[in-house]
Amino acid sequence: MLTAPIDPGAELASAVAEYRDGNDVGRLLERVRAVAAACAVDALIAAAEPFRELPEVAGPIYERVVASRPDDARALVILANAYWLSGRGPDVVGELASRAIAADPANRGAWHLWALSESVLRERVARWVQVAERFPEDELARANLADNAASLASTEGDRAALQIALRTYRALLHTARHPDQRAALEQAIGTLERWRL
């Protein structure tokens, strides 16, 4: 008896709807893994797109995609992000991010996950410095650099980190356009300027 091929988009949408109604993550993972095993990689990528930020869907789908395309930087980044959001830990995320960087050195998402996954604060600041230098217009990278440098200055009394944080927050203030963003940056700068390390 022949069975009709499944529509991966419809099946994933149905699985997610069932999960949202019943909150049964085991059932969701079972259904997503069945779709991942039964469908071609290109169809999986298209079907998973609306659910890319849902790690319970993106994880199993992109495990299959990465197994099929181990040098696909975008797939590696999506899988690393799904793992990060589901709490899989910095080691596996950092390894996937490093593979994505090797596959496509211009992939900013890979660089962000590489920096984010460093568990040692001082080393994380050094990584954010590299990302901010590589992508000078990337305000999210610069904000992460400033935040991590401020944390390093606070926890370790590091004057150099304090200067990095101040310099980076001031540069962000220079380009900020939204009043709330400007106010938050001004407050952060004012607080850091009062620190005595």
Image: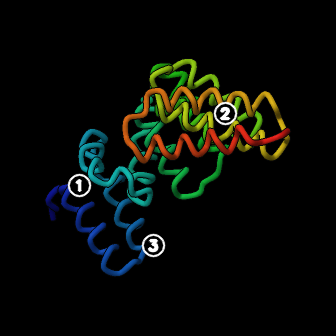
Q: Which residue is mark 1?
A: 8
Task: Give the amino acid at mark 1.
Answer: Pro
User: Crowdedness of circle 2 by 10 Å Cα count: few (<14), some, many (20+)?
Assistant: many
Badge 2 element = helix
Q: Which residue is mark 2?
A: 165
Task: Give the amino acid at mark 3.
Answer: Gly
Quadrant containing the C terminus in the rendered view = top right
Q: Are marks 1 and 2 in contact (CB under 8 Å)?
A: no
Residue 131, given in percent of the width and then of the height, sits at: 57, 25
Q: Quadrant of residue 156?
A: top right
Q: Is residue 157 left or right of residue 161?
A: right
Q: Nearer the viewer, residue 77 or 139?
A: 139
Residue 26 shows which numbered tag? 3
Residue 90, given in percent of the width and then of the height, sits at: 65, 46
Q: Is residue 40 visible?
A: yes
Compared to residue 84, the image places residue 118 above or below, namely above
- The residue at the point 41 percent across, 77 percent down is 24
User: Crowdedness of circle 3 by 10 Å Cα count: few (<14), some, many (20+)?
Assistant: few
Compared to residue 63, the image places residue 165 above or below, namely above
Q: CA distance from mark 1 to mark 2?
A: 46 Å
